[in-house]
Image (cartoon, helix red, strand yellow):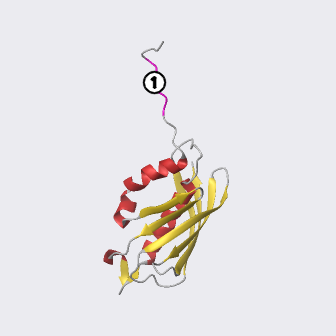
Amino acid sequence: MSTVNEQPARQQLTRAEVIRRFFPTSPYVGYLDMRIVEMGDGIATVELPYREELVTAESVVHGGAVASLIDVAGMVAAWASDDIPTNQRGSTVSLTVNYLAPAEKSNLLATARVLRRGRSLVYLDIEVANEAGNIVAKGLATYKLG
């Protein structure tokens, strides 16, 4: 027997499902035209397509765009798990970027891997490569879930 006040059970989404739904709705991600290429437990690859608007000089992608790619890939990998979150909040706590080579006129792929998951902090290593597979930047990030 049901009563008027009964509410249907809320569907509980995994962290991975949350990020899959959030990603295409993020205005900043959309502005940079990023897309998730691959996502598994604690790992994610995100693409930043080359566009003239992202160039700093000649055909080199601006370091800020590369840093944004590192940050976003880290966020996706931090959320890439089958855990059910208690809330849908998260934030980058720390981000270190090392530029190894110019990112010249190329789509870029960032692969982020979880190094360690704590109760609320996730530590990540992120590598950015050009289309030829050459590493152009490395990042270390700490992301807070919840």
Number of marks in picture = 1
Instruction: Tell me where the magenta segment starts and ends, as one range.
Output: 5-10
Front-lying residue, 97 or 133: 133
Q: Position of residue 97 (x, y in %)?
A: 55, 74
Q: Is residue 68 above or below residue 20?
A: below
Q: Name the residue: 40% across, 79% down.
A: 106
Q: Amino acid at mark 1?
A: Gln
Q: Is residue 40 above or below residue 15?
A: below
| Residue under label 1 | 7
- Residue 34, by quadrant, is bottom left
Q: Position of residue 42 (x, y in %)?
A: 60, 58
Q: Secondary structure at mark 1?
A: loop
Most frequent secondary structure within the magenta stretch: loop
Q: Position of residue 76 (x, y in %)?
A: 51, 58
Q: Position of residue 2 (x, y in %)?
A: 46, 15
Asked if the stretch drawn in magenta spans residue 7, the answer is yes
Q: Is residue 62 above or below residue 113?
A: below
Q: Residues within 10 Å of mark 1 (few under 14, many from 20)?
A: few
Please give left or right for residue 16 compared with residue 64 in the image. right
Q: Name the residue: 43% across, 72% down.
A: 65
Please give left or right for residue 25 compared with residue 112 in the image. left
Name of the residue lying farthest toward the top: 1
Name of the residue lying farthest toward the bottom: 58
Q: Name the residue: 42% across, 70% down.
A: 48
Asked if the stretch drawn in magenta spans residue 99, the answer is no
Front-lying residue, 93 or 84: 84
